[in-house]
Image (cartoon, rainbow, N blue to C red):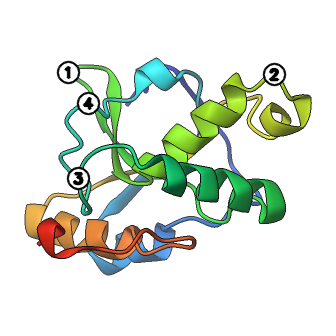
Amino acid sequence: MTLNNFIPISQWEYGDSSLLTQKYGGVIVSQGYVTSFEAFDISNRNHQTRQKGEDRGHIDDLIGSIEAVGLRRVPTVKYDPISGKFQPLGGHHRLISINKMRSSPSPKRCHEFKDGFPVLVVEFSDKMQEEFFCVEDNNHEPAKTHAKNDV
């Protein structure tokens, strides 16, 4: 399968959700860099397990964490061949944080992500297993806690 706006790579220094994907019966399609923020479909956030919307404080916390210790776990996405876009399963806020870092005038902030947005591309045939994966994959540091409204 050809993925639009994507540079596949064989190895990287990031952590990812490969084992978690396999635990829930998913298949790893590829790993690499999505070259443009516009290549993501995050408008509907169907797979977001917490309240919808951007939390600026949480985004700033993530940026600070990425600057201090690096990106520990790459976002997990699935590819929609019809739209040609990547749909985040886990890492909505990490993608927004990386986009802000890439858009920053500070060379220190954008250097790590000069090649694009590192992602793990996966597929799930069982929608229930995909949802279980999403909940566990979104449990990362610094994590935004789930609230009653998320339930």
Q: Nearer the viewer, mark 1 or mark 4?
A: 4
The amino acid type, in three-letter code, at marker 3 is His
Asked whether the beta carbons under mark 3 and mark 2 sit within 8 Å of each other, the answer is no
Circle 4 residue: 43
Residue at 43 percent of width and 22 percent of height: 39
**Picture quadrant where residue 87 is located:** top left
The amino acid type, in three-letter code, at marker 1 is Ile
Circle 2 residue: 105
Circle 3 residue: 47
Label 1 residue SS: loop
The amino acid type, in three-letter code, at marker 4 is Ser
The alpha-carbon separation of the residues under discs 2 and 1 comes to 35 Å
Q: Is residue 25 visible?
A: no
Circle 1 residue: 82
Mark 1 or mark 3: name the one nearer the start of the chain: 3
Residue at 74 percent of width and 36 percent of height: 113
Residue at 26 percent of width and 26 percent of height: 81
Label 4 residue SS: loop
Asked whether the beta carbons under mark 2 and mark 4 sit within 8 Å of each other, the answer is no
